[in-house]
Amino acid sequence: MKARRYVLLNRDGTIVVEWHYLSDPSQAELLPSVASGLRRMREQGLGLTVVTNQSAMGQGFNNMMQLDKIHQRMCEFLVKERILLNGIFFCPQVPEPSVLA
């Protein structure tokens, strides 16, 4: 059995318009040409997985419910374009202060 290859995609600024701490699902919108690029990857047999750093959660700018709604909206846009994701993974951690200095 041949192993499937996957593309790991950042969410903000790669799939959806980047906002400083996106927390309002109504602001989530696909970037131009994203759908055609993702569709081409799918046609080549690649799996599509989103990985995203969401330190805004750790900082209290949004919560799990808001994040789920943002991802649902993004997926609704993608489904309309006949694109299904294999998964969405996020990291809510806030960088250590020494890392920010």
Image (spheres, rainbow, N blue to C red):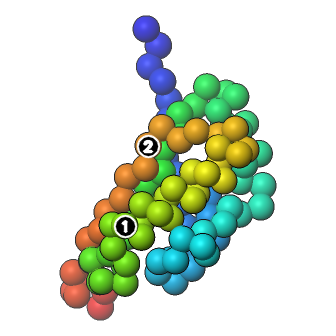
Residue situated furthest bottom in the rendering: 101
Q: Mark 2 or mark 1: which is in front?
A: 1
- In this view, the residue in front, 21 or 6, is 21
Considering depth in this image, is 71 or 47 the residue closer to the camera? 71
39 sits to left or right of 91? right
In-image side of 15 versus 43 (left or right): left
Q: Is residue 10 visible?
A: no
Query: What residue is disc 2 on?
Result: 87
What's under tag 1, amino acid-wise? Answer: Met
The picture places residue 55, in percent across and down from the top left corner, at 34, 75
How packed mark 1 is, by other alpha carbons closer than 10 Å (few <14, some 14-19, many 20 or more), is: few
Residue at screen point 60% across, 73% down? 26
The quadrant of the picture occupied by the N terminus is top left
Q: Residue furthest top?
A: 1
Q: Quadrant of residue 92?
A: bottom left
* Residue 29 appears in the picture as rendered: yes
Q: Quadrant of the C terminus?
A: bottom left
